[in-house]
Amino acid sequence: MKFFTALSVGLLASALATGGAAAQEKTITIATEGAYAPWNFTGAGGKLEGFEIDLAADLCARIKVKCEVVAQDWDGIIPALNAKKYDAIMAGMNITDKRLEVVAFTRPYASGMHGFATTKDSPLAKLAGLGERANLDKDPAAAQKIIEEWKPLLKGKTIGTQGSTVNSQFLEKYLKDTVTIREYKTTEQHDLDLAAGRVDAIYAAHSSLKATLDQPEFKNMTIAGAGVSGGVLGRGVAVAVRKDDADLKGKFDGAIQAAIADGTIAKLTQKWFKVDMTPQG
Amino acid sequence: MDFTFMWETFRQLLTGVPLTLNLAFTSVAFGAVLAMMLALMRMSGIAVIEMIAKAYVFVFRGTPLLVQIFLIYYGLGQFRPTLQELGLWTFFREPYWCAILALTLNTGAYASEIIRGGLQSVPYPQVEAAKAAGMSGFLLFRRIVFPIAVRQALPAYGSEIILMVKATSLASIITMMEVTGLAAKMISQTFRAVEIFVVAGVIYLILNFAITRLIMALEWWLSPHLRRPPSIEPRIEAAHV
Amino acid sequence: MQQLSYFELIGFGPKGWGLALLTATGMTLAVALCGFLAGSIVGTFVAWAKLSRNLAARTLADGYTTVLRGIPDLLVIYLFYFGGSAALGAIGGLFGAQGFIGVPAFVTGALAIGIVSGAYQAEVFRGAYQILNRGELEAARSVGMHRWLMFRRIIAPQVLRYAIPGLGNTWQLVLKESALISVTGLVELLRQSHIAAGSTRRPFDFYITAAILYLVITWVSTYLFQRAETHSLRGLRRTS
């Protein structure tokens, strides 16, 4: 009989847990990745930290709601938003046309460059345009020229990148026939594989590459080639919400605008990225 | 449901089938050799060797395959300089071989129990008869023990192969683009998780159905003296997770 | 930054992940246990359907085990995760619930494990039921026991007794299955190790710790199931 008692207690408990979650309505759940330093990452002991955790707290205070930030695997993060696992995504996610087909974005709260990183002794360290910036929207010809200059050096190399990102889409679009693309679940994993020598270079956001370079285990790593933005690389990092959630989008838009206006974004990006990444325009 | 989309998904996911089958059958083949060794160790009668085999089986059956895969792929990556000195790095550098190694070590543990069961099921009078006819050692093993054991173990080994086909889906976690890996990639392009995973599931069902039929045919072919209606009764056994 | 020693890394100091790992181990046990119980319920119904004379019930149950046997558990979990709450949302919509039905990752995980392990437990229960002495069932019927009473007094206790070894195997399976739940974002043992490995860039240290913790759980539960088996058979004479 004990068995059945245990069963019914278990069932009751899970029913209560479900009901309980449905009852709390005024809490917004925000998904982040928790593996994308310094945007969002997991610190010692398993606590979520980073730019977006700070920003979420600030924005939620402006909207006057209670927010809970949860970590979520990147590759299912959009389908799970639409499956109503949470209400919003703040995970270093860029606005792209492809994503706009399935979710809505607020106005951007940060923007930055994307590029390669490799080991210092690698021939790829000499990729053209280090320190330069190219924009696929504003000056497509110049950007295309830099990409063409990379091709001879990149020929036949294996490049690691995180799957379902603007970075993997950039590689697919411009360098698919030149390099072998290997897709990882997190940027941390391709960092490890670059250090282990399983890939020749990695392609990611400069902000995240720089955070990796700062760690002692990766002192042999360096940024290579020009930084690129725009086009498939997106139009800045924003909060993603479900398409039918116009109310929440509106609230976030207002809060982000206010945070840009009073310099909160500039202050927070300085704190986490050591450079002002406030979106322009 | 959008059938044109699902059909297109089906066609694209099919390109991952060769890698799925490659991973499954390569590791089953290596795993069978390992399992045979482990089974013989378990039955060797030498306490130390038996203990080693027992401990091996306990460790590999007692931990999730996903942990084993992570440990071999990312964990050993931490020891790259040492592995390079030993000349083993070219092996561990490739995600393919890491996946094969993890799957082989894993199936070796499960299959050794199946083979042990098969070997123990050989009726002793048969062995006695063979000995009376003057057989011994390897000849006895090759002609009498092994064939009977294989026939006995085949249904369970069939389930094991099915489990391995399913287990290959975990290789997608370490960048292998087999069926599940491709499905994950397609989801990242279309964001239509449910439809794509349903199609992937159908592909695995078809694969496993075909393999089940093949094993049934093999069983029938190996048992000419019995030729009863084949019975690969749905056996659910410990899966590799 | 000096490299931390292994014991500092998994210890309970300010840079240590010890507490997080232990909490996650507790989560693994909790989700595995709830999943196992959910699987027992599913398994009981499926076993009953498989043994029933109703063709539709039998077909349905066979279809369920065939599908579950044929597709990778990882896919089942993904499907359950993405599809499950959409379905739940639709059902909730029918009853006027407002759009968002939050299903905690824990419940999703436990239910997914329940669905997968239910297929295995169904086979265990069916096998155990078939060992039952038919005479006892006839005797129970002849003294006028009704179906539910007979199930409770005669069938369930004995089936459970015979099923213990099989359930022990299923439990091990469920325990390992719970590692796959990590893909849904539930912070159980594997996910916590994964997070720690990524955060500290020391994958080996954390995955080997996870492996050891899993082995400890396996070892303890094997012992407990053996105790339960001996206990349940105390009134029986061994035939072998």
Image (cartoon, coloured by chain):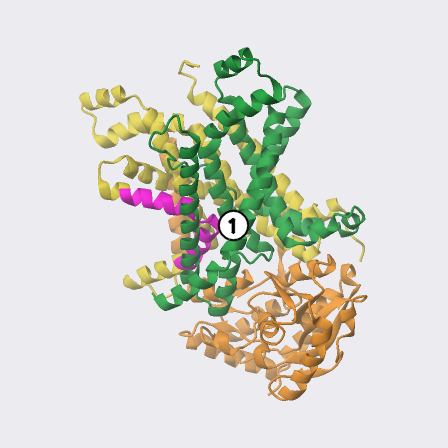
Chain colours: A orange, B green, C yellow
**Secondary structure of the residue carrying numbered label 1:** helix
Q: How many marks?
A: 1
Look at the image and tell me in which quarter the N terminus of chain C lies: bottom right
Among the 4 quarters of the image, the one containing residue A280: bottom right
- Point out the residue furthest to the top here: B132
Amino acid type assigned to the residue bearing label 1 in the image: Leu
Residue A137: % across, % down: 60, 86
Please state if B49 lies on the left or on the right of B123 as rendered: right
Q: Main secondary structure of the magenta part?
A: helix
- The reply to whether the magenta stretch includes residue C80 is yes
Q: Nearer the viewer, residue B33 or A233?
A: B33
- Point out the residue furthest to the front here: B133
Residue B238 can be seen, yes or no? no
Look at the image and tell me in which quarter the C terminus of chain C lies: top left
Residue under label 1, please give it. B21
**Neighbour class for label 1 at 10 Å: few (<14), some, many (≥20)?**
some
Q: Nearer the viewer, residue C198 or A117?
A: A117
Among the 4 quarters of the image, the one containing residue A138: bottom right
Residue C165 can be seen, yes or no? yes
Q: Please, is residue C18 above or below residue A177 in the view?
A: above
Q: Nearer the viewer, residue C236 or A10?
A: C236
Q: Which residues are magenta?
A: C59-83
Q: Chain of mark 1?
A: B
- The reply to whether the magenta stretch includes residue B86 is no
Residue C58: % across, % down: 27, 40
Q: Nearer the viewer, residue B236 or C133?
A: B236
Name the residue at 65% across, 47% down.
Answer: B71
Q: Please, is residue A191 above or below residue A172 in the view?
A: above
Residue A168: % across, % down: 59, 70
Residue C63: % across, % down: 33, 45
Name the residue at 42% across, 34% down.
Answer: B221
